[in-house]
Amino acid sequence: MGRSSDVPALRRGLAVLRLLAAKAEPMTAAAVARELQLPRSTTYHLLSELAAAGFVTHLPEQRRYGLGVTAFEVGSAYLRHNPLEELARPLLRALTDRIGLTAHLGVLHGAETLYLLREQPRWPLGLVTEVGVRLPAHLPASGRAILAHLPAAQVRALFPRSGSFVLRTERGPRDLPRLRRLLAAERRRGWAVEDGYVTEGFASVAAPVVNPDGRPIAAISVTFRHECDAECGRQWPDLAAEVRASAAELTARVGG
């Protein structure tokens, strides 16, 4: 059994990894020390040990540090096992049984929403959101439920230019300022709404699932038929309450 004195060092090392993972760009050692309130010498020692193990990559020309290949391998192994799906499946099934609508579990994959799970009612709807489908993250409610809780710099890095804003219908944010206003409103409200952005005649609401650090890792959404000539601004708070309850339960199951 390891010495108890090793535990603080382990915790600090994990804090470094979480910090690097949360940033859109590599960081200097000084920035890491400042954000984690660590002594410079301790920070350099931690970064050196993590780099030797492959969890951190040192970029000498930039004098910065980023996540290493080993961290990517651990993340890939998590995706292969994906306990998130197993934890979410019964919650989605229960949500669908309660409200009679199609429920999804989505995650952010770059600038796209990737659908991992779908539970359908007895009479399902014809939707494009099959398991494995990817959609531009700024369009579906599940994507924006996650984006709304990311740092502004990370959102900007995901959507760096006007060409990043692909539309499927005539609705949806067309540039970064409009997306930011939409995300700010959804962050304050606590859930995201999509009305005809993905498929005409359908709408959806979604709520984020967060990890122990409070970062969004997924979203639960429900999709239903809704048609209006122009975007009507409905927010469906009753449905959102059901979705938020399921997202809160999944958050608790992952320790968030």
Image: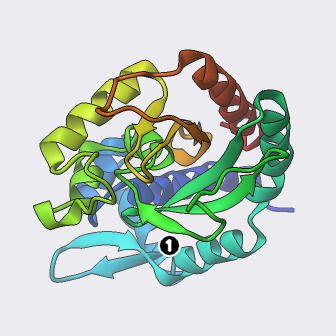
Report the side of 244 relative to 173 (left or right).
Answer: right
Residue 72: image location, x then y, percent: 53, 77
Question: Can you tell which quarter of the image residue 160 is in?
Answer: bottom left
Please name whichever residue, 98 or 12, is drawn nearer the observer in this view of the structure: 98
Indicate the quadrant where residue 256 lies.
top right
Residue 201: % across, % down: 47, 43
Q: Which residue is mark 1?
A: 50
Classify 41 as above or below 37.
Answer: below
Q: Is residue 239 above or below residue 160?
A: above
Q: 18 left or right of 87?
A: left
What residue type is disc 1 on?
Leu
Position of the N terminus by quadrant: bottom right
Q: Residue at x 51, y 51 (%)?
A: 15
Residue at 38 percent across and 79 percent down: it is 57
Q: Is residue 152 in view from this perspective?
A: yes
- Is residue 42 among what the camera can see? no
In the image shown, does 81 or 15 lie closer to the viewer? 81
Apparent side of residue 79 relative to residue 196 in the rendered image (left or right): right
Q: Please indicate whether residue 220 sits to the left or right of residue 16 in the image.
A: right
Q: Nearer the viewer, residue 3 or 14?
A: 14
Q: How many marks?
A: 1
Above or below: residue 43 compared with residue 182: below
The image shows residue 145 at horizontal and vertical percentages of 46, 40
**Figure colour scheme:** rainbow
The residue at the far top in this view is 238
Secondary-structure class at tag 1? helix
Front-lying residue, 56 or 171 = 171
Residue 39 screen position, x and y as percent: 35, 48
Q: Residue at x 48, y 24 (%)?
A: 190
User: How dense is the environment of label 1, judged by Cα within 10 Å: few (below 14), some, or many (20 and up)?
Assistant: many
